[in-house]
Image (spheres, grey):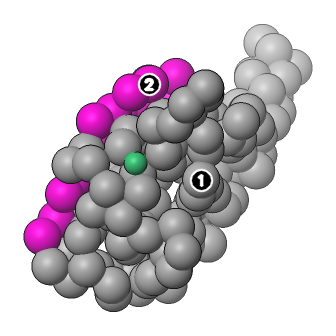
Amino acid sequence: MVKRSVLRCATAAAAIAGAVTLVAPVVANAQVAREPASCPGGYFCAYDGTNYGGTELLQSNARAGSDHITVASDRVTSAANHTGNYWCAVNASWPADITIWRWAPGTHTRDMGSGSNRTDWFYVRTASQQCD
Ligand SMILES: [Ca+2]
């Protein structure tokens, strides 16, 4: 019984260690003040002004694998990714839509520069999948 109990503890410790490794980037991000504070943890937020100003166009906790998350066309200028996933911005183009911006988990962009006012929709991928 004792050995079995020890084994259970070791297994639980291994599981915890694994979980800590997986969430490490999020934990590291949580230790720094979120930017902007108005975008809640677990959400991706997009704005039509620089420095998260103007109108908040999107606040979403859509899961990885989500596609065609619509946002007001050609207005996104800044955004913050407070999720553990990649968020990818797409400009609808011909002959194919083009990924024009990518936010790794826990990252933000105060001014998309030449990428501003082009986004038409977003898709979400896991940290390992990343954007196309
Ligand atoms: Ca566009």
Residue 68 on the magenta span? yes
Mark 2 CB within 8 Å of ligand 1: no
Above or below, comparing residue 21 to residue 11 in the picture:
below
Which residue is disc 1 drawn over?
Answer: 100
Check residue 71 in the rendering and tell me which mark sits there, or answer none.
none
Which callout, 1 or 2, points to the residue nearer the camera? 1
Q: Which residue is mark 2?
A: 66
As drawn, which residue projects farthest toward the front? 94
**x, y percent for residue 36:** 31, 80
Q: Going by the image, does 96 lie left or right of 40? A: right
Q: Residue at x 59, y 53 (%)?
A: 100
Contact, CB < 8 Å: mark 1 with mark 2? no
Residue 59 visible in the picture: no
Q: Residue at x 27, y 62 (%)?
A: 75
Q: CA distance from mark 1 to mark 2?
A: 17 Å
Mark 2 neighbour class, 10 Å CA radius: few under 14, some 14 to 19, many 20 or more: few
Considering the image in quadrants, where does the N terminus appear? top right
Work out whether 11 lies above or below 86: above
Give the amino acid type for the residue marked by disc 1 in the picture.
Ile
Residue 34 visible in the displayed image: yes
Question: Percent position (x, y) of residue 97?
Answer: 56, 33
Q: Which residues are magenta?
A: 55-70
- The answer to whether the beta carbon of the residue marked 1 is less than 8 Å from any atom of ligand 1 is no
Q: Position of residue 112 (x, y in %)?
A: 49, 75
Q: Residue at x 81, y 15 (%)?
A: 4
Which quarter of the figure has residue 96? top right
Q: Front-most of 95 and 81? A: 95
Rendered position, 36 above or below 3: below
Q: Secondary structure at mark 2?
A: loop
Q: Is residue 4 left or right of residue 127?
A: right
Q: Is residue 34 left or right of residue 64?
A: left
